[in-house]
Amino acid sequence: MGKRYEICLSGSGGQGLILAGIILAEAAGVYGRKYVAQTQSYGPEARGGASKAEVVISDEEIDYPMATRLDLLLAMNQKSSDSFYFDLKPEGTLVVDSTFVTQTPTTKAVCIPFTEIARKELGREMVANIIALAALATLTKVVSMKSLEAAVLARVPKGTEELNRKALQLGSKAAKAILKERKPESIQGHGPNHEDITYE
Amino acid sequence: MARKKSKKKPRLLQGNEALVEGALAAGCRFFAGYPITPASEISEILAHRLPQMEGTFIQMEDEIASIGAVIGASLAGAKSMTATSGPGFSLMQENLGFACVAEVPCVIVNVMRGGPSTGLPTNPSQGDVLQARWGTHGDHPIIVLAPSSVRDSFDITVKAFNFSERYRTPVIVLSDEVVAHTRETVVLPDPDEIEVLDRIKPSMPPEWYIPYEDTSSGVPPMGIFGDGYRYHVTGLIHDIRGFPTMRTDEIEPFMRRLFRKINQSFHDVQIVHHFMTEDAELVVIAYGSVARSARRAVLDAREKGIKAGLLHLVTLYPFPRRDVVATISDAKAVLVPEMNMGQISREVKRVNEGMSRVATLNRIDGSMISPQEIYEWLLKEA
């Protein structure tokens, strides 16, 4: 059986999590040539409410397309951190947006203020999802930064390429800072073996 | 299901997007619909794509008008489709029967969501299976196909158009929210790699044309409106010239022909996939997105040494009785997992005639059946 890696990106409607899921799936599937399945769940409301995107990455064809036991959870608000933490494998990685998540369910959680970084450094909160994706890729190497950048640039609206490139750099930088100050075992979780490509 | 990795660059597509690609590849050039979750992407993409290929997209005032427009466009020669979900599908039932009786080729996509009524717009279900079969009134044959993956959504939509053209019948593509919204990387075939069928047109001069005359296939050639082949189209039972009749010696042959044209083509329209069923003692019969969970469960059970197999139904109607009977006759037990209270399991029980024990696994909480649930049954029965 091939390796199956399950990711959940969660938060509230409007934080760009479904787009982030699509980009992550494209980075792994189109540019990284893995098998991927991306699913989502959201309420009937137009905005607000809970939103979550799941990405399953595998070396073999994926039958069941949804995540069952997560290897990696991104929680962009308190509620999703509280509710989806229990789907995480014991050795899985939890990454939270510490702008909104003030109480983490584990000390091993990686806390990065994605939204605050987006607001302060780029003046645009909407790229918090891209900053988060770069951080996830840097932390777990689930996709290479090269694939991620290609996928991001192919999906974002024209004219925002530079903004998104900067967002990727900021996310990668924040994650590297975490990796420097903490031992890997204090973070848990190791992505599937990918080439170690760092973002320049 | 297993496919070689192609050299072509894969694309990340939703089931609904692949379905659109399949429709266009099959020659669909007319779409009329009314948006509804989880089928809206189909309208959205076709609104963009059809005008680029001299096709027509119309957003109608409701689903009743949508299928009406689809029937009209098909009579005028365009391969036509509409897409909806449960509530809209209910509204389409009357005209669906019209398409059956007037023998108008068309494809109706129903992306199933939780019901009844407006139900659960963003959650999956398989609650419309029997409605797809019997939703319109009166005795009628129908073809119902259920995709289970993104690539399936392409292939089955091509097949749906081919069947509708070959047999002059509406074909229902019964997708579900999981299939429609899951994105997977796929490499779609080039146009020269797929078979596309067109309706048979009359070869005689217009004045000799008898629109509903029987043929060996039971499918009369179809004159296109505007080509000079004038004939009468009605929902009333009609004679071979298309005019209403109450003569028993005309009604019976007409009704028999409607059924015969599908019934004598079971070999063509009944599609199933066997997965490890040759020596299976425990058989899972599944369709749509649930077939994916079933496949995983069967693989996991095989690893434990349990002789499990999956009969994956692609064609739900005409119910593939022959394949089902052959597969379950030697089985110790059969499980039919469905996201409803038991619709295909009724059919399985009907054809089983007491040969095997048929168990059901029903989930109606708006969630997909997980591989674990099916696996647990296999463990228990082994």
Image (cartoon, helix red, strand yellow):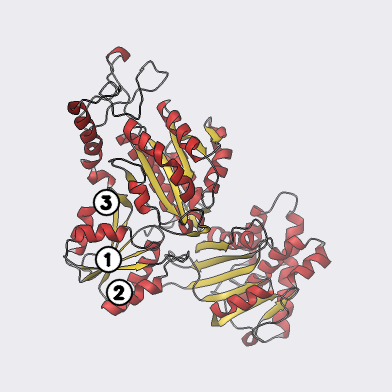
Q: Residues within 10 Å of mark 3 (few under 14, many from 20)?
A: many
Q: Amino acid at mark 2?
A: Arg
Say which residue appears at 44% left-offset and 35% top-offset: B80
Q: Is residue B124 visible?
A: yes
What is the C-alpha distance between the residues marked 2 and 1? 9 Å
Q: Is residue B37 above or below residue B96?
A: below
The numbered disc on residue B302 is: 2
Q: Is residue B161 above or below residue A116?
A: above
Please indicate whether residue A106 sits to the left or right of residue B291 in the image: right
What residue is pinned by disc 1?
B276
What is the C-alpha distance between the residues marked 2 and 3? 28 Å
Q: Nearer the viewer, residue A60 or A37?
A: A37
Q: Amino acid at mark 3?
A: Phe
Q: Earlier in the sequence, mark 1 or mark 3?
A: 1
Q: Are marks 2 and 3 on the same chain?
A: yes
What is the C-alpha distance between the residues marked 1 and 3? 21 Å
> In this rendering, which labeled residue sits more in front, label 1 or label 3?
3
Q: Is residue B33 above or below residue A138?
A: above
> Element under label 3?
loop
* Chain at numbered mark 2: B
Say which residue appears at 37% left-offset and 34% top-offset: B98
- Would you identify the image quadrant in which residue B281 lies? bottom left
The quadrant of the rendering that contains the N terminus of chain B is bottom left
Q: Amino acid at mark 1?
A: Met
